[in-house]
Amino acid sequence: MTLVCYVVLVLIAVGLLASPLLGFVNRPALWFGLPSIMVWMGVLVLLITPVLAIVETTRGPDDEEERR
């Protein structure tokens, strides 16, 4: 499960970094009345929080001991 979350986090990061290069995002268009790149980045930023919460809650007790 955590591996899937890490992959999703990497995809979100790549999506954020590649936003200016993506043609369907970086164009003069409005999505929901806002510029498309603003909506795209806002959705990706909002997705980060639940994925990080899942990573934090699925950590086992062994992971906490290794950090110390």
Image (cartoon, rainbow, N blue to C red):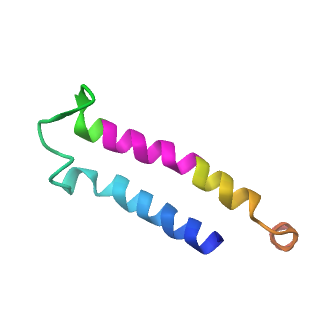
Please indicate whether residue 44 sits to the left or right of residue 3 in the image: left
Quadrant of residue 5 in the image? bottom right
**Residue 45 within the segment the image draws in magenta:** yes
Please indicate whether residue 33 sits to the left or right of residue 55 in the image: left
> Residue placed at 58% from the left, 46% from the top?
49
> Residue placed at 27% from the left, 51% from the top?
19
Q: Is residue 44 above or below residue 29?
A: below
Q: Is residue 21 above or below residue 29?
A: below
Highlighted magenta segment, given as a residue range = 39-49
| Dominant secondary structure, magenta | helix
Q: Is residue 50 above or below residue 37?
A: below
* Position in image of residue 60 (x %, y %): 82, 69
Question: In the rendered image, which quarter contains the N terminus?
Answer: bottom right
Q: Is residue 48 above or below residue 10?
A: above
> Residue placed at 72% from the left, 57% from the top?
56
Specify the farthest residue to the left: 28
Please indicate whether residue 21 sits to the left or right of residue 6 in the image: left
